[in-house]
């Protein structure tokens, strides 16, 4: 999926995305990793794992949605100013085919950046030795949040020690 060319409002966008992504326990649980990282475009990649499947062995729709939401969120985040954080305010997912693959790529692309609201599109692909298959699409709306301590990205306390 190609994306329009955007200029980031913060030259440190890539570092900010990497640091924020590292704080996401949900993405760590999925074994997800960042792939493409560019202004207005982020890919998240993950491998098939039995712990992430539903009863038929397909990647669970909730896992697909979570990774697509993060891909869209970080795509939007790449275009936000340094003082902003990002929160999803709405998404819709279309599950097009069973998510059966060895690996998966979730693509988030900004369609329309705004000062407060950004609209993104996501696509999930199942990857096989013989190619890839589109398994889901997402429409996602995100909000730039500034000046709120309750949404600042920061490490969580260690509750085990």
Image (cartoon, rainbow, N blue to C red):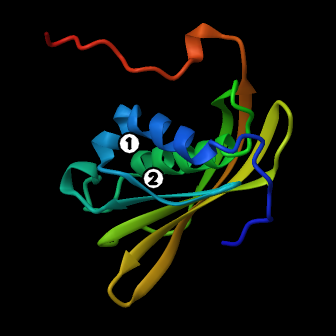
How far across and down, in percent of the image, does residue 131 sit?
Answer: 43, 86
How far across and down, in percent of the image, does residue 158 sit?
Answer: 24, 14
- 90 vs 1: above or below: above
How far across and down, in percent of the image, does residue 117 sit?
Answer: 81, 35
Q: CA distance from mark 1 to mark 2?
A: 11 Å
Q: Which residue is mark 1?
A: 27
Query: For the point 69% across and 55% down, which residue is it?
Result: 39
Query: For the point 40% across and 65% down, which residue is it?
Result: 104
Label 1: state its secondary structure. Answer: helix
Taking the image as shown, residue 32 lies to the left or right of residue 82, namely left
Q: Quadrant of the N terminus?
A: bottom right
Count of numbered badges drawn on the protein: 2
Taking the image as shown, residue 54 lies to the left or right of residue 10, namely left
Residue farthest toward the bottom in the current orientation of the protein: 130
Please tell me which residue lies in front, 139 or 115: 115
Q: Which residue is mark 2?
A: 64
Taking the image as shown, residue 10 lies to the left or right of residue 161, namely right
């Amino acid at each position: 999926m190609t994306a329009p060319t955007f200029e980031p409002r913060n030259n440190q966008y890539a570092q900010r995305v990497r640091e924020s992504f590292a704080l996401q326990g949900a993405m760590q649980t999925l074994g997800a990793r960042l792939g493409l990282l560019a202004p207005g475009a982020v890919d998240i990649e993950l491998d098939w794992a039995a712990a992430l499947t539903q009863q038929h062995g397909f990647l669970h729709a909730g896992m697909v949605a979570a990774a697509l939401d993060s891909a869209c969120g970080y795509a939007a985040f790449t275009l936000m100013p340094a003082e902003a954080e990002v929160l999803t305010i709405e998404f819709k997912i279309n599950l097009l085919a069973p998510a059966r693959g060895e690996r998966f790529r979730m693509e988030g692309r900004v369609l329309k950046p705004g000062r407060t609201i950004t609209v993104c599109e996501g696509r999930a692909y199942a990857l096989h030795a013989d190619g890839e298959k589109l398994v889901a699409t997402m429409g996602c709306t995100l909000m730039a949040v500034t000046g709120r301590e309750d949404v600042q990205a920061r490490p969580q306390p260690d509750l085990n020690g």
